[in-house]
Image (cartoon, rainbow, N blue to C red):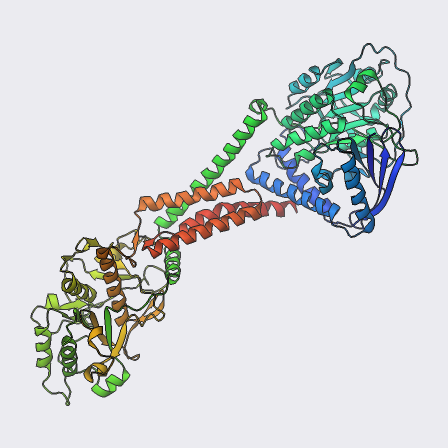
Amino acid sequence: MGKAIVLKIVAGDFDSGFPVVLQVLDERGGLPLAERSGYLPPHPHLEGYYFNWQTSFRSLTSQRGRDWGIDPDLPSNVSNEYDIEACREYAKLLEKNMKEWLRQTVDAGCLNIRERLIEDLAENRGNVRITIQANPKLWKMPWLEWDILSKYADLGIGFSLLEYQKPDAIARSGKQGAAVRILAVFGNNENIDLTPDKQAIAQLPNVELEPLEQPSAAEVIQKLRDKRGWDIFFFAGHSQTKGDEGIIYINERESLEIGQFKEALKEAIRQGLQLAIFNSCDGLGLAEKLAGLHLPIAIVMKEPVPDRVAQRFLTEFLKEYASGAYLYTAVRQGQKCLEEFIDLPGCTGLPIVCQNPAEVPPTWEELRGRERGSVLIPESIEISDAGTIFRDREKQVPDELTGSSVRDRKIVWRKLGRSLAVSFAIGLFVLSAQWQGKLETWELQAFDHLMRQLPVEDIDRRLLIVGADETDLSLYGHPLPDAILAEVLEKINEYQPAAIGLNIIRDRPVENRNYPGEHNAFLTQINTSSKNVILVCSIGNDLDSSTEPLPGLVDSERQVGFIDVFDDRDLALDNRLRRYLLYRSDNPVPEPTKCHTPYSLVWHVVERYFQHHHSIDVTLSHSHSKFGSVGIQRIANRSGGYQNLGEYAKGNQILIRYRHTPDPNQIAHQITVRDVLEQRHSFKRSRIEGNVVLIGMTAPTLQKSFSTPYGKISGLNIHAHVVSQILSTVEGELKGKNKRPSIWWWPQWVNALWVLLWSSIGGTIVWRFQQPLQRWVAISGAILILYGVCLFALTQGGWIPLIPTILTLLTPTFCLSLYTLFKLKSFD
């Protein structure tokens, strides 16, 4: 014995909620088996969600030309993936809220209704149907999203008006044989293809078919009154709902309102008409009118749908129904087949069954043998029904009739191709912006950020810094006399350092009354220690700001290095120091400077260090620097994040890899001048022998500091950082354990491939993930992976572009989200 479940919603609205009654009935006997009452809570926004989806869906299915019930203000059918995405989001929002509305209630009566429903569905699986008896405005809602029904894939839902009655039957005459009599009207076919409909009807087994091609109104009415009666009335073409009236367009000139041929329909129903299928658009108005005529069963599509969707549903439904499936099950199978149309979100809920509760849905065999069902529900329960299948159709697209799986694959690959094409175009645009230097500031700041994330390191024990602090200056005077410097050099040289860099400008004798005539001693100390002592001069910005080397040196080119450094104030929106000039390019036009040495202080220091320890050949020019077999990459135009160095790319300069010590101004052991002169405990052989010693000013009032990724660092320590970098790179390579390689970067063509790779990843994410939340989670995950790759590469010395790749990842999703937001605003 089958069961029918009726959920009766007599009154109420979405603002105040709905009182509901659940009745469980014996399908054949019409006897009530159980009854529960409850209350569905208010949900004032649910109708708005439906309207948003409806508006978006109709904009996808609207046609050019004659208006067949579609709002003329809606867009034409020239839609794109963003329209589809907006519609998909509206559909998900509607379905989610419908599901929550039906599930999340604290009303005890509704909880009892849920329990009873679950019990009856479990006991009568495959042999039960549900009817929603309510105002037609509730028919539109996606009841199939009810979580209770999720385990019952073949369970159908029908809809009924609140008032109904069983039609009075009259004797049928003249039906010959066991065949299903079908009156099929094929109406106005402007912009649609009715051929598949004709084929689906004609291929049905055991059918007596009467087709009418674009008939007149009189022909339709006359045929409906046929005394032999009809089992199914089928209409394909165009229709619409105006107000509460349903209209069908039977030819190019004529249309019929239901009210204009209701008497013919009543007579057909009395003579046994069981099922009406109106294969046209906007069918709820037709269904509601037909319900007043007490038609037993109708199947309608509640919104306009494309031709291919209606054809697919009709074909699947008729195939299942004619093969013996229960009518509700056949409709459900047809609905599920519509899932393949992923470009029409929400279309699976368009076909609905309108059921007269006083009738039992007939099987195909019962239509053939005229075995009528008995009353379903006692007369005390007032319900009504209506029905017909409707659709508005797209212009025919022949290649869409070639099979759903092939079509789906084509659609999927076409969408992927579009996403990749858009992301590729975005990648090219970002590369163009990078090439023009528009991203240079951002990329340099990203480089600074990544540098600060590198692991903290210990001080470099191959260096010793001797700094003159405020106490030294008060004891020995300022500037430090030549006699003091000579004594400092003498005491340090006793411990045989590899190199001494005197980072104190000395271009003339400096004597005071406490140390008279000591300049010659200082000069003698310099010349006798020429193999490991380097003095400095300054190139300056002009002749007046430059300084010349100390006069009287034996070999000034080998004993003097420039100490000038150049920040990025002319290249970016900051003045950070990221580059270090090792060698000045030869200039055919003499520069206005007194300092003509082509080599920096750092270069002289590291050269002596490697000659002392490794006896390797060291060469330096404007194009390369080699330490034996080890080279350090030189900055040229378009290096890493630098894209517009231009004139600033001259000479041999490298990117500075600062040593990430807790205090960037404490890169090595540091002592004072008085520690050396008084030979205190901090001044010891182990810190000097074979190491590099840098002498300079550390007094805050005199030292010059530079902005770096790690904050302010004094000039003396800037040179120490670069010395440490080169020593670590070369010795690491020579030992085969390079833990601190110098910064390197890819050539431009590899950089371009990298950016385009990530742009394709961004496009694939946009294509693969349809929900905004999922998409942003995927994008965030990709950015984290990209960030991790760039950070790991930097630990190995590699500067991989971060900003261009992030932009290519974010831009497709951002544009899509912006477009969807715009669509949401316009719909609101």
Q: How many marks?
A: 0
Query: How far from the left and from the top, in percent, is residue 628?
Result: 16, 55
- Residue closer to the observer: 358 or 814: 358
Note whether 454 is above or below 364 in the view shown: below
- Residue at 21%, 86% (x, y): give it: 477
Image point 27% across, 74% down: which residue? 669
530 to the left or right of 186: left
Residue 99 in the image: x percent, y percent?
Answer: 71, 44
x and y, in percent, of residue 316 in the image: 67, 24
Does residue 334 appear in the picture of this structure?
Answer: yes
Q: Residue furthest bottom?
A: 513
Judging depth in this view, the residue of 381 and 34 nearest the camera is 34
Q: List x then y, in percent, for residue 317.
A: 70, 25
The quarter of the rendered structure image containing the N terminus is top right
Q: Residue at x 15, y 77 (%)?
A: 489
Query: Is 26 left, or right, of 348 in this rendering?
Result: right
Q: Is residue 739 found left or right of 210 in the rendered image?
A: left
490 versus 557 height, above or below: below
Residue occupying the far front of the picture: 123
**Above or below 254: residue 760:** below
Q: Residue at x 61, y 31 (%)?
A: 340
Rendered view: 686 above or below 216: below
